[in-house]
Image (cartoon, rainbow, N blue to C red):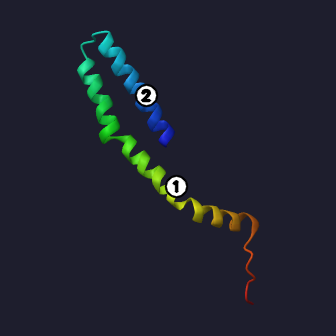
Amino acid sequence: MLAGAITSSVYLLEHAIWSCKSSEPTRILDAEVFRRWVIEGGMESAIQSLRRTKSDTDDRVSINSRLAFGAKEQSKL
């Protein structure tokens, strides 16, 4: 998700720069689209998702290991 948001942001930034340099009639709109995407759009939620994933990493690694290789604890029968 984050890679897609970054890719979209770079594309929108490049387009806004090109639009301004070329004096396109939509240059103000293009710059606003980029600003809104970064500030109000996908980037913020993608960054929050990344932070959530990083905070859960240790627990997830432990659980993933137990799922894949079995628990070290003995079952009480």
Q: Are marks 2 and 1 in contact (CB under 8 Å)?
A: no
Q: Position of residue 71 (x, y in %)?
A: 72, 73
Point 29% across, 35% down: residue = 36
- Label 2, label 1: how many angstroms apart (C-alpha)? 24 Å
Point 51% across, 38% down: residue = 3
User: Looking at the image, is mark 2 or mark 1 nearer the viewer?
Assistant: 1
Q: Position of residue 19 (x, y in %)?
A: 32, 15
Secondary structure beneath dot 2 equals: helix
Point 33% across, 29% down: residue = 34
Q: Position of residue 30 (x, y in %)?
A: 29, 23
Disc marking residue 54: 1
> What is the crowding at mark 1: few (fewer than 14 residues within 10 Å), some, or many (at least 20)?
few
Q: Is residue 46 above or below residue 29?
A: below
Q: Is residue 73 left or right of residue 34?
A: right
Identity of the amino acid at label 1?
Lys
Identify the residue position indicated by label 2 in the image. Answer: 10
Of 28 and 58, which appears nearest the observer?
Answer: 58
